[in-house]
Amino acid sequence: MTGGPAGGQREQWAAHRRRVARMHHPDLGGDPDEFIRLLNQVDARFGQHDGRRRPDDSAPSALKRARYRLRRQRKAGASKIRSALPRGFPGARRSIEL
């Protein structure tokens, strides 16, 4: 937990969050908006947050998407090269006889 309360207050904070989750979680028939609002109230009461992403920063930035795309392309290119190498060549997919 980033920025969580210290000492015994951490247990109280976690207990309050669990209590809210047991009573208002959407999977148990609660309203999602009410659930989030109540969790935010608990966090504000203790002056902390749980370190999870909030709706305002949930969308990935264009830079993150570009990095992910480049990583996928690089991995696919390396895979294509390794599969084209001769079987006994070091670094090939199968560099030894099975």
Image (cartoon, grey):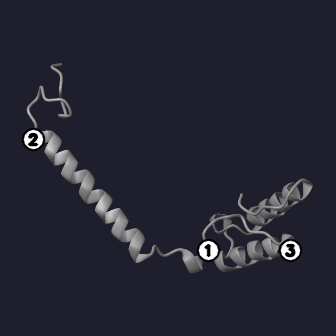
Q: Which residue corresponds to mark 2?
A: 84
Q: Secondary structure at mark 1?
A: loop
Looking at the figure, which quarter contains the N terminus? bottom right
Q: Is residue 55 above or below residue 7?
A: below
Q: Earlier in the sequence, mark 2 or mark 1?
A: 1
Q: Are marks 2 and 1 in contact (CB under 8 Å)?
A: no
Q: Position of residue 17 (x, y in %)?
A: 78, 63
Q: Please state if 16 lies on the left or on the right of 31 as rendered.
A: right
**Which amino acid type is marked by label 2?**
Ala
Q: Single out the mark in the foreground, 3 or 2.
A: 2
Of the residues under marks 3 and 1, which one precedes in the sequence?
A: 3
Q: Residue at x 36, y 65 (%)?
A: 67
Q: Which mark is residue 45?
A: 3
Is residue 86 depicted above or below 18 in this figure?
above
| Disc 1 crowd, CA 10 A, few/some/many (<14, 14-19, 20+) | few
Tag shown at residue 54 = 1
User: Looking at the picture, how far across and down is residue 53, in whole percent?
Assistant: 60, 69
Residue type indicated by callout 1: Arg
Whether residue 23 sits left or right of residue 70 in the image: it is right
